[in-house]
Image: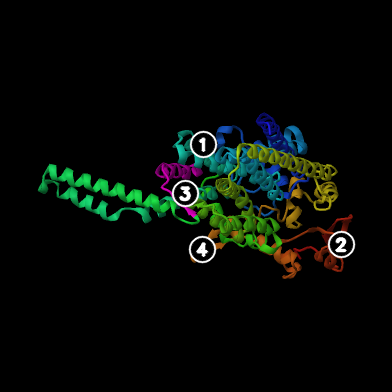
Amino acid sequence: MNVKVNKILKFIIEIFFIMTIIFFSYSITPKTFQNDTFYTIKIGELIQNSTDNARDLLPWNKGLDMKDHFSWHNLPYTYPHWLYDLLTYKIYSGWGFYGIYITTCILAVLLGLLIYFINLKLNKNHNISYLITIGTIYCLKNFIAARAQLVTYLLFVLAIFFIEIFIRKKNVWCGIGLIIISLLIANLHCAVWPFFFVLFIPYIADWVCTGIATYDYENHINGFILRFKKKKIGKLEYEKQRNELKEKIKEHDRVVESRFRKTNKIEISRRKNIKGLIIVMIVCAFMGLCTPIKDVPYTYLVKTMQGNTTESISEHQPLVLVTHENMIVILILVFGILIFSRAKIRLCDFYMLAGLIALSFFSQRQISMLVIIGNFILVRLLCKVVSNIKGVIKFDEINREELKFVGNILMISIVFSISAISVYEFKSKKIDSFIDETSYPVNAAEYINRELIPVFGKENLRLYNEYNYGSYLLFQGIPVFIDSRADLYAPEFNGQKNESGKYEGNDIFSDFTKINTLSKDYEEKFREYKITHVITYENSKLSSLLDKDTNYSLLYSDEYFKIYERVRSVYE
């Protein structure tokens, strides 16, 4: 088979790889927004309008007011992704919802291309890098949205690349890049900022464990003792014994390296530049101070884990493996390679993978991190499998070129299949709208702004609403009972610690959960909060009860939502 033909095919396939990654990433980006997008826009607008000068946002200046302006509870607010909110509003103010959608598509495409090119740079295998990149983007399908997390995915991918290059080459620019990434995450999405440091831990743990296991304790101790005996034994004898110790240490290192090569499943090696990486990590830890939100990057995750909001939000729930096909496939691939092949996994990769899998079982939200970071480990393992196979099976030059030709044809077939899937995904979302009227009270919100607010005023309207669509009401300028900023409504964020170490404050999130599940008498809570109006889904349990409750009259009803007014005043 002509070598030139294979080179031309390889070049064409590479172009197709890039094009299909772009189109596939674009095609699976949802057009319909999630609830977080709506409050993001309004908070960005608030920051824009309340900041007279950009210098006010510097950490040593005025900063943000740390107050919530959108619920009627008068609570403090932490602005956990203030910079992303501000940038999103700037896009919205210029190009509307379409601008946010296109920006999300661009970020998804950048994520796909970045994963592909980094895999290519680290492992040098086009086909495996392409296939795993497509699989990674597909597994992230449910996580790609107009939310701050999409930007941090990009930054985490870059962080892994910078860490790898820094360790291999001690590239100073990669160290500076890691510091900049830490600064960006602390301002773009401080809730995940602590996770940035998790990326360093496997490399440091690898270095520490390998160092402890392979350190030549005897000869180094003898060298330490020898320094104290220098004057007693004389300079010549000291130099002689020191050189002997150096030779013994070198021989010990050679034996250790030989043992490293004989390990079965774990690839152990002494990694350089880890001390430099530790210094970079320490500098990165100070980037949390460079925000206008005070100490929030250091405290946000801790407070979130102490609260009960994670128990009721689906993405924070523990993983049930049988309901997640993607996770099952990932685990089968990784453990299948480790059990049934001769490929070795680096010790730092083993630590990283074990930690990410544990985090994924602890919280479904962390599956995205397992997919993003784990894909680099999976590509590395698959490349080792292929390399081992090539080492076992020998081909002559003619058969090798024929095999390459068959492989190229197979990859072209896969590319066309992925293109067909992309076209299907694109067509299926073409009819979607930016706002799903079955999930968000579009017409009901217009009614509230047109009929209720002019009569009651925003300051007197105490509307009870549900969690899932509170952000849309907020977006429409309607004061809310609750929205998807779950932290805002937990005592860990709006209260103070008492003498026993527990937070005392407004546990609005728990009250909402009790009302929504009817585990608590809704009337008791409505009196406590002095609710004047209620908006709920048309087919909700609460709606069926309010229809029969003489204390409430139905003001508005459409296909998806109902609005009730309390007949008897709660102040009576």
Which residue position is annotated with label 3? 203
Q: Could you say where residue 164 lies in the image, as x and y percent from the top left?
A: 50, 42
Disc 2 to disc 1, C-alpha distance: 60 Å
Disc 4 to disc 2, C-alpha distance: 42 Å
Q: Are discs 4 and 2 less than 8 Å apart at CB?
A: no
* Picture residue at 76% right of the left edge, 53% below the top: 469
Mark 4 element type: loop
**Residue 177: mark in rendering:** 1
Whichever of labels 3 and 4 marks the residue nearer the N terminus, that label is 3
Instruction: Name the side, left or right, on which 19 lies relative to 379.
Output: right
> Of the residues shown, which amino acid type is indicated by label 3?
Tyr
Q: Quadrant of residue 340?
A: bottom right
Disc 3 vs disc 1: which is toward the camera? Answer: 3
Mark 1 element type: helix
Which residues fall within the magenta stretch? 266-289
Whichever of labels 2 and 1 marks the residue nearer the N terminus, that label is 1
Whichever of labels 3 and 1 marks the residue nearer the N terminus, that label is 1
Disc 2 vs disc 1: which is toward the camera? Answer: 1
Q: Could you say where residue 3 lies in the image, as x and y percent from the top left?
A: 65, 31
Provide the major secondary structure of the magenta segment: helix
Whichever of labels 4 and 2 marks the residue nearer the N terminus, that label is 4
Which residue position is annotated with label 4? 498
Which residue position is annotated with label 2? 553
